[in-house]
């Protein structure tokens, strides 16, 4: 179960060009993973995220996120940015992304294929290229609660 409150927080293009998107409204996300682990995140206005980071050579097949797909990309990027602080595995991050793509995406092809592409490219990026997204992003206020 994944619940975003409000259901569609306001997202606008990032004015500073730091990342692609800017969350213009505070929101919360509650996640209950299949193993029963629960996570509640409160995110302040100002969180910036990339959306779908699609390699340039494949952008003709998979354009960057837009519309309702952004909500799945938002939560996936948030979990990856918090990876050093939370014990949420890549498998769990990808599960969340897949569930949200099914719920939010209006494009049946994208909702089925993008989770597979994200999982595959994430695996390559993380294991072969060694990119663990360890760089620190601009700070935004975060309040994190975890239950087991």
Image (spheres, rainbow, N blue to C red):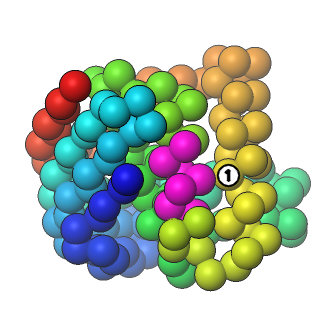
Secondary structure beneath label 1: helix
Residue 139, by quadrant, is: top left
Q: Position of residue 15 (x, y in %)?
A: 37, 72
Above or below 60: residue 137: above
Dot 1 alpha-carbon crowd within 10 angstroms: few under 14, some 14 to 19, many 20 or more: many
Residue 100 in magenta?
yes
Q: Is residue 45 visible?
A: no
Q: Position of residue 39 (x, y in %)?
A: 25, 39
Residue at coordinates 18% horizontally, 30% vertically from top-left?
147
Return the residue at label 1. 115
Q: Quadrant of the C terminus?
A: top left
Above or below 22: residue 48: above
Q: Is residue 63 left or right of residue 106?
A: right
Residue at coordinates 59% horizontally, 53% vertically from top-left?
98
Residue at coordinates 87% horizontally, 54% vertically from top-left?
57
- Between 130 and 114, the residue placed more toward the observer is 114
Residue at coordinates 73% horizontally, 68% vertically from top-left?
110
Magenta span: helix, strand or loop, mainly?
helix
- Between 95 and 54, the residue placed more toward the observer is 95
Residue 90, by quadrant, is: top right
Q: Position of residue 54 (x, y in %)?
A: 71, 54
Stretch of the chain drawn in magenta: 95-101
Above or below 78: residue 46: below
């Amino acid at each position: 179960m994944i619940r975003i409150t409000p259901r569609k927080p306001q997202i606008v293009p990032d004015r500073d060009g730091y990342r692609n998107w800017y969350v213009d409204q505070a929101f919360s996300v509650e996640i209950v993973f299949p193993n029963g682990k629960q996570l509640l995140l409160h995110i302040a206005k100002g969180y910036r995220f990339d959306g779908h980071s699609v390699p340039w050579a494949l952008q003709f097949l998979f354009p960057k996120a837009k519309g309702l797909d952004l909500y799945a990309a938002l939560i996936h990027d948030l979990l990856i940015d918090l990876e050093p602080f939370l014990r949420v595995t890549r498998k769990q991050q990808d599960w969340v992304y897949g569930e949200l793509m099914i719920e939010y995406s209006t494009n049946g092809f994208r909702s089925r294929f993008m989770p597979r592409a994200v999982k595959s490219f994430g695996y390559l990026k993380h294991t072969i290229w060694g990119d663990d997204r360890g760089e620190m992003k601009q700070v935004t206020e975060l309040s994190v609660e975890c239950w087991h």
